[in-house]
Image (cartoon, rainbow, N blue to C red):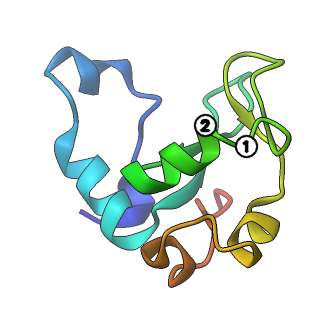
Amino acid sequence: MKLSEVDLNDLDTFEKGTPHDQFKLLRNEAPVYRHRGGPGQEDFWCITKHEDLKQISKSPQLFSSERMGAIMRDRIAQLQELGSISEAAKSHSITSRPAPA
């Protein structure tokens, strides 16, 4: 599976169980990943490393759940500079799914 094939919007995927293969790929290749939203939905962030999630949960000034769940403000780079994101996430750029052609 390629990163471009990750689709967490497809509810059929979850009917078969947790898509562990997709989450594993995200953890290994893009632990901080901006996933395109489905039709009529906003993009969302996938944070797939436990250490990163712990730090994010301790930083409400940088992250918000004001609208439709946990919406991450675009301050990941600031958090990386402060050393609050794991080394694994620092070694990967913040990754977004390419725009459809």
Point 34% across, 61% down: residue: 27
SS label for mark 1 = loop
> In the displayed structure, would residue 16 be above or below residue 2?
above
Residue beneath label 2, please?
A: 57
Q: For residue 17, what is the image quadrant?
A: top left
Q: Quadrant of the C terminus?
A: bottom right
Q: Is residue 68 left or right of residue 38?
A: right
As drawn, which residue projects farthest toward the left?
A: 16
Point 62% across, 45% down: residue: 56
Say if mark 2 contacts mark 1, CB within 8 Å. yes
Residue 95 in the image, given as x and y percentages of width and height = 59, 67
Point 14% across, 21% down: residue: 16
Q: Quadrant of the N terminus?
A: bottom left
SS label for mark 2 = helix
59, 43: nearer the viewer: 59
Numbered tag placed on residue 99 in the rendering: none
59, 31: nearer the viewer: 59
Point 81% across, 18% down: residue: 67
Residue 30 in the image, given as x and y percentages of width and height = 46, 67
Residue 71 in the image, given as x and y percentages of width and height = 74, 33
Q: CA distance from mark 2 to mark 1?
A: 6 Å
Residue 57 in the image, given as x and y percentages of width and height = 61, 37
Q: Is residue 12 left or right of residue 59?
A: left
Residue beneath label 1, please?
A: 59
Identity, as a three-letter code, of the amino acid under mark 1:
Ser
Identity, as a three-letter code, of the amino acid under mark 2:
Ser
Q: Is residue 6 left or right of residue 95?
A: left
As drawn, which residue projects farthest toward the bottom?
A: 91
Can residue 36 be seen by looking at this rendering? Answer: no
